[in-house]
Amino acid sequence: MSALLEVRQLTKRFGTLTALDHVDFDLLPGEVHALLGENGAGKSTFMNLLYGLLRPDSGSVSLEGVSYQPASPKDAVLAGVGMVHQHFMLIPALTVAENVALGDEPRRGFGIDLGSVEKKLAELAAEYHLEVNPRAKVADLSVGLRQRVEILKAFYRRARLLILDEPTALLTPQESQQLFRAVRAFQERGISVIFISHKLDEVQALSGRVTVLRRGQVVGTLTTDQTSPAELARLMVGRSLAPPVRPPSRPGPALLEVRDLQAQGLGPLGFQVRAGEILAVAGVEGNGQEALIAALAGWSRSQGEVLLDGRPLGRLGVRARAEAGLGLVPSDRQEDGLVLPLPVRDNLALRAYHRPPYSHSGVLDLPYWATHAETLVREFDVRPPDRRAPAAALSGGNQQKVVLARELAASPKVLVVSQPTRGLDIGASQFVYSKLLDLRAAGKAVLLVSLDLDEIFALADRIAVLYRGRLMGTVPSESATREGIGLMMLGQEA
Amino acid sequence: MNVLANSELWASTLALAIPIAYAALGGVMSERAGVVNVALEGMMATGAFAAVAVSAWSGNAWLGVLAALLCGALLSMLFAWATVYLRADHIVTGLAINILATGATGFLFNALYGPLGTPSNTPSLPRWVLPGIDQIPFLGKIVGHHEALVYLFFALLIALAWIFRRTATGLRWRAVGENPKAADAAGVPVLRVKFWAVVSAGAVAALGGASLSIGSLNSFSPHMVAGRGFIALAAVIFGAWAPLGAFLASLLFGFATALAFQLQSVSNIAKNLLLMLPYLVTVLALAGLVGRTSPPAADGQPYDPGR
């Protein structure tokens, strides 16, 4: 079978950085070809070249045997290439049909013929298992449905090649399953899919072949069912990945004690986290995790008792809680963890800017901030190692390192972390894990709120399961099974 | 309550609302495409002056209207070029345009007519009478006879509402004001769409100026716009960035002005206090409302296609 897409020796440089280095890649008609790599491996650059958002420095691409050099997304779309971005390119204030038609509107007289768009959408929906109400406002749709709209937008423009950029990053497991079913339907109809991911199990479930990128180079193209997650992981990071070493725990006295905690959508619930222990809170998203974090951090009012090393936090505000020894790594690091336009230096000082050594009598000691930031940037290996760079300019992994560095620099007795590795690649995740385990070894208490069972089993000493705002129970991780935790997450007694 | 039963109050509410409503429509067009339009005041001043000057020169008020349209569009091109292509701050640029327009129209007016002011033979727009409707009791007195631009406003309002909802142009306007990046990815020429939206907005706002100068009166005086452009901006917000909403909000401000005039003759509240009324209503309306409606998501943000 001749290839739909042939990429030969494709190279793209940004200044001195070679983002993509002589890459070869083939895509057959009806094939699902996974592209695997860490953040910064060149996946996005590769996709942006294929979609006309960037121009290559050298190399060639041909589509159905014809040279393909898109100068803009419009060219890509005309050639039958569609892309579903990780951050959706939709306009929430418009309806589904309007979003789909935008830029390629069918006219009737002076007006726009939305009726024909709706009809076409109904046909596509039936063909590809992508049902969605064309008159609904996109703002009212769930993330999974919005993604459908993105895919429909591509098919509406007669895409034969679909690029899915980390399509499951924001989906629930059920939505992911629906997506996979749809992708198989695409395949049956001869649509080719490039599936970008760093989740090994999805790559295995969906793709026929997988190409692994590392530092801009192809390190291998393998047939998916003749490889293993271990081999893929090794190719991806260039070394074997050992699970993080977790020495047996010797928990001390309770550092965080929660009794009858109650807030909107939460509780009543109680638990303890002891010194030298990681307690994980597992659960399906939306079962009270955010309310728990908000109550502990002091963002919202709550009833009940929270004791930190025996001291009641009561009505203390956010700052007072931090001063009492509570560290927090919130789940949304861009919204709650950082001030994105501010430089790394200032973000590192956000927690304690108001007191010595960060400031004296209300005057900021900026030279101290600079040396302090310099030290932390080096210690936490923030890249680029530039304290003047705005936090917005960093990758997700490096943003998380900044948040972590700030919280750990205050030497908290208790650290509350929520989804610490969401959206991070393997390397950055390992770094976060090692920092959390260091904290545990140093006799601190860590409360880990996570949606990721792999993470929970890798780190936790005990696992508490949150369901509809209440704890289903707490089990030591040695005796816990995935199935058991899974059942509790669905509200059943294990 | 005698005041409210007076049909003259309601007729002048409409007449006083229309200049603001034109500018507010322009504001809606511009802001839905993502450009905050503080320059409405300047567009109105330009329209008011161009209308009088050309009307006096040619002897035809309709040519004055045409001149207002063109001059509004022209000045708006400057505004659009700076805000859309040079990505200048919308507020600062808009204020600069206002200063430019007020200064230039005042200067040209003095240079052309000197201390005598607008020539007394300047034609003004015809007053139209709606046959039949003007015979209806009470209502006929309110809507039955007005200057032409009042009636044309409704045609424009309906056309614009339809353009927004039912045409590709309207869809693109809304799209670039909400999420220019997504519109760009969908193949919409974002900068061009924004540019022409702002230029058309200027033309429409200038009609508001024309209706001030050659509509109800046949004269121009520097500063005659007197903040109506800013009231129109408030009407855009109060009207939730929709054409009909902006019109209804303009009616409220027109009513406040009309009421102030009426009360002057029937009460002994100080005149200057009463004349504050429309501005006070503006402040109260915005204070009570802003925060409860949401502007187009990318309103006021310059778009850089390279990023």
Image (spheres, rainbow, N blue to C red):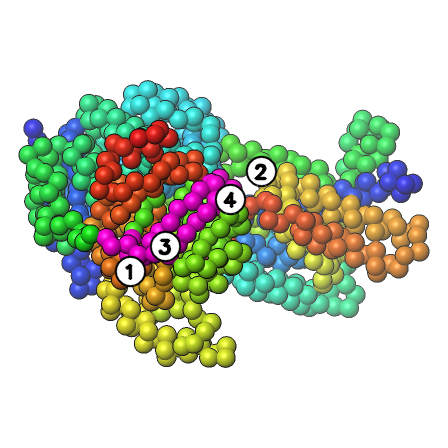
Measuring 58% from the left and 36% from the top, which residue is drawn there? Answer: B161
Is residue A435 shown left or right of residue A365? left
What residue would you read off at disc 3?
A254
Q: Secondary structure at mark 2?
A: helix
Q: CA distance from mark 4 to mark 1?
A: 30 Å
- Kindly report which numbered mark, 1 or 3, lies closer to the viewer in this rendering: 3
Q: From the image, which quarter does the C terminus of chain A lie in?
A: top left
The first of marks 3 and 4 along the sequence is: 3
- Kindly report which numbered mark, 3 or 2, lies closer to the viewer in this rendering: 3
- Kindly report which numbered mark, 4 or 1, lies closer to the viewer in this rendering: 1
Query: Residue flagged by tag 4: what amino acid is it?
Result: Ala
Q: State the image coordinates of residue B254 (x, y, percent, origin top left).
A: 75, 47
Is residue A46 shown left or right of residue B106? left
- Kindly report which numbered mark, 2 or 4, lies closer to the viewer in this rendering: 4
Q: State the image coordinates of residue B52 (x, y, percent, origin top left).
A: 70, 55
Within-10-Å neighbours for mark 2: few <14, some 14–19, many 20+ = many
What residue would you read off at disc 2?
B160
> Is disc 1 in the same subunit as disc 3?
yes
What residue would you read off at disc 1?
A443
* Residue A452 shows in the view: no
Q: Which mark is residue B123?
A: none
Q: Which residues are magenta?
A: A249-277
Residue sitting nearer the eye, A140 or A492: A492
Q: Secondary structure at mark 1?
A: loop
Q: What secondary structure predominates along the stretch shown in magenta?
A: strand
* Residue A463 shows in the view: yes
Residue A268: in magenta span = yes
Q: CA distance from mark 3 to mark 4?
A: 23 Å
Query: Residue flagged by tag 2: what amino acid is it?
Result: Leu
